[in-house]
Amino acid sequence: MSKCFLESFNPADGSLVGTVETTEIADINLKVDMAKKMFADWGQLSVDDRVNKLAPICEKILSQKDEIALLISQEVGRPIKEAKNEVIYTVKDIKWYLENGLLDLQQKVLFENENVKNIIRREPWGVTAVISPFNVPLEISMWGIISSLVCGNTVIFKPSEYAPLVGQKIYELFCQIGLEAGVIDIVQGDGDVGKYLVESAVDFIWFTGSSKVGTEIYHTAGKKFINCIMELGGSNPTIIFDDVSITDNLVSDICFGRFINCGQICSSIKRLFVHSNIYDLFLEKLVAKVNSLKIGNPLSEDTDIGCLVSKSQLDTLKSQVNDAIQNGAKVECGGKKPEGFSEMYYEPTILTNINTKMRVFREEVFGPVLPIIKFENEDEVISLANDTEYGLAAEIYTESAQRANRMASKIQAGRIAINMPRYADLSCPMGGYKKSGKGRQHGKWIFEELTQIKHIIIKK
């Protein structure tokens, strides 16, 4: 049988970045079988031993940081300065998982008296399928892989078909530190490969991606009666009240929170609500800031806005914007392909005169487009903010601590940031309400998700 290959093209110019061999269905089963065999040894190692085996990955990444950043930028169109930051953040994240895994996964005495001793032990599930997205291909993938391995699970890793070379590089890094074959393996291909991996004999599923695919995975996991953790889409509201000063820092926060990575971040600002008293002035300043962003080659250090990752992503974005315009939205800036660039580029766009029936309000917008909605009072904006099937994150800007607390208690989202843009701390939980996910990543919560509890009672 002839081999099949997955080609990876640079979305900025259409050039071929490289190819990887796609994984045959029969090979997926063989890889899962090997991972199950290796789990018998890997899962029985102490946390200390697993951490010691994994720790060299940090230096290995740093020794190749420029090569990895270049690959990220070439393969998914992320500006090189952001790609470099992604590599550095990834190393910090890995160190956090290793250090805190040593603490949170140790056996603990729950209760003890003169008669009995109660011990709680956290033990791994088995083989984890780690399925990661294209938009932050190194860091998010490592979240799933490292946390699973520290917990004692073995891993079958499925990178996005839009970032197969970054995925292959991740796998090679683990091979370079001498991790035993079968402790981690990789499968490459499109959604059908991911679907078969989910349906295979894996014991746990870690997934970051769209809510549509996540729903399908959740159904499959339920039929198999296995656990999963999923961080899915978002249509995150950011609310600005009229008691805040419209400073350059505030405008920059909003601009960063929406347009980083060309708007392709699940937890970025997706709907902006601005109080009517400051609406006109804020809009004027934001449009000026957005117009100052430099669109350019992702490999240029001064580029702010790169390109979208795929034609399908671009087509969806265009369709959402066209729907808004046809239903009365006004384009304040952007709204088209910039002159002199390939078709995969789209100008950073601000839309006003938005209503709740428009797709840019109802759906997740995964690209550099920001709809802005004027509001009058708290009750109105809470109703609007919660009028979505998503609930990943939200931001509130106000000088009133009482108002901030009221709003935070009423907004249906897994993370609320007050007077600051999107925020992620590895010590804090990350996950969403409604169709934005199941379970929580990061902090002690990810170690709980990726293990099962064993209670041991010892009679004295």
Image (tube, helix red, strand yellow):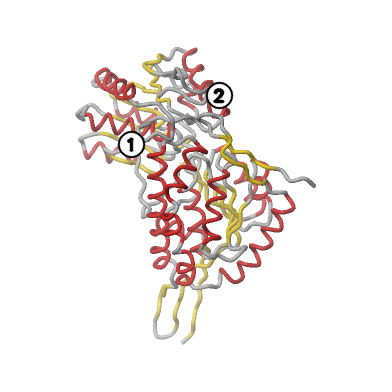
Residue at (56, 69) in percent of width and height? 43
Name which quarter of the figure residue 192 lies in: top right
Residue 266 at x, y = what percent? 45, 38
Query: In the image shown, does 121 or 77 lie closer to the viewer?
Result: 77
Q: Nearer the viewer, mark 2 or mark 1?
A: 2
- The three-letter amino acid code for the residue at tag 2 is Asp
- The three-letter amino acid code for the residue at tag 1 is Glu
- Marks 2 and 1, the one that precedes in the sequence: 2
Query: In the image shown, does 384 or 441 lie closer to the viewer?
Result: 441
Distance Cα–Cα, label 2 vs label 1:
28 Å
Residue matched to label 2:
315
Q: Secondary structure at mark 2?
A: helix
Is residue 336 found left or right of 428 in the rendered image? right
Q: Is residue 28 above or below residue 349?
A: below
Residue 416 at x, y = what percent? 34, 41
Residue at (42, 55) in percent of width and height? 63
Is residue 104 found left or right of 4 in the rendered image? left
Which mark, residue 109?
Answer: none
Q: In the displayed orientation, state which residue is furthest to the right.
A: 1
Residue matched to label 1:
395
Residue 141 at x, y = what percent? 50, 49
Query: In the image shown, does 1 or 212 lie closer to the viewer?
Result: 1
